[in-house]
Every structure is written in C-alpha cells, then in structure tokens.
Image (cartoon, rainbow, N blue to C red):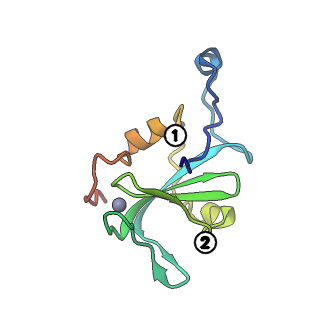
Amino acid sequence: MDRRPNPAAGTDPLLQLTAVPSLPTGPGVTRHLSHPQELTLRGIPVMCSVCRARRDWLLINHGRNVWVICRCGNQWLEPEITRADFDALIFFPDGTVYPSLDQALAALGFDGTFAGTYLN
Ligand SMILES: [Zn+2]
C-alpha cells in the first residue's frame, strides 16, 4: 500500500525538465519539515513502530494530510497532525525544492540509510 503523497511534478519528463523550481505555495504542493526533537501528540510521544525511534522525524505535508517519516524509512499518515499544526511547526523552512518525494527522502537521509540512528 502506497501511503505517500503524490508529488505535484507529475510523471511527464518534458514537463519536469522545463519546470523551474520555486518556493512551494498553495494547497497542491508537498512540503517537508525536519523535526529533530521528540514529537508529542495528545501527551504521548510519537514512537516508530518499526525501529522504536522517538525523535528525529521528517514531516511531509500534502493537502490536508501530514505523514511522519522515520530514519529507518518507515512512514505513516498521522491524522493527529493537521495542516495548521504543520504550518505552526515551520520555524526554519530551508526553502529547498526537490523534484520528487523520493529524491527528497534520499537527500535528507530518510530513505532507510540511517535506520537506527539519530542524526540530530
Ligand atoms: Zn523507524
């Protein structure tokens, strides 16, 4: 089951070649946010069900949905986090735009390479 958001870029290679990266805005974009601290939802710290990590998350927002991604590559839709929560969490948006979610995960070290590791 693929629970990941669909990147806005689509699959047309010509479109991707000509697309000029710009800071994502609007409801259709996919945004990411590093969250090195523990994440507490309703008083309960978030824990990865696969590797039992308790911090150093990547949060992905697409539309009204927010996914939590662990260093081990585990990811899940987190209904407790709303888009407004996500907006409030963005302290230092780095403005980096990646052509696809997979490339973002690899670049940020959330593709499973650092499973079992806290980098922050
Ligand atoms: Zn994990």
Badge 2 density bin: few <14, some 14–19, many ≥20, Cα 10 Å: few
Image quadrant, ligand 1: bottom left
Q: Label 2 is placed on what type of residue?
A: Glu
Q: Tally the numbered discs.
A: 2
Sequence order check, earlier mark of 1 and 2: 2
Q: CA distance from mark 1 to mark 2?
A: 22 Å
Q: Quadrant of residue 56?
A: bottom left
Classify residue 27 as left or right of residue 93. Answer: right
Which residue occupies 39% across, 39% down? 107
As drawn, which residue projects farthest toward the bottom?
A: 43
Label annotation for residue 2: none
Q: Are marks 1 and 2 in contact (CB under 8 Å)?
A: no
Question: Which x, y percent locates residue 86?
Answer: 61, 62
Whether the residue under disc 2 has CB within 8 Å of ligand 1: no
Classify residue 47 as left or right of residue 19. Answer: left
Question: Which x, y percent locates residue 54?
Answer: 36, 71
Q: Nearer the viewer, residue 24 or 109?
A: 109
As drawn, which residue projects farthest toward the top?
A: 14
Up-down relation of residue 52 to residue 76 (above or below): below
Residue at the spot of label 2: 80
Q: Secondary structure at mark 1?
A: helix
Question: Which x, y percent locates residue 117?
Answer: 25, 58
Q: Secondary structure at mark 2?
A: loop
Q: Label 1 is placed on what type of residue?
A: Leu
Which residue occupies 39% across, 58% down? 70
Q: Nearer the viewer, residue 120 or 50?
A: 50
Classify residue 106 as left or right of residue 87. Answer: left
Question: Which x, y percent locates residue 75?
Answer: 46, 56
Up-down relation of residue 85 to residue 107 (above or below): below
Residue at the spot of label 1: 101
Whether the residue under disc 1 has CB within 8 Å of ligand 1: no
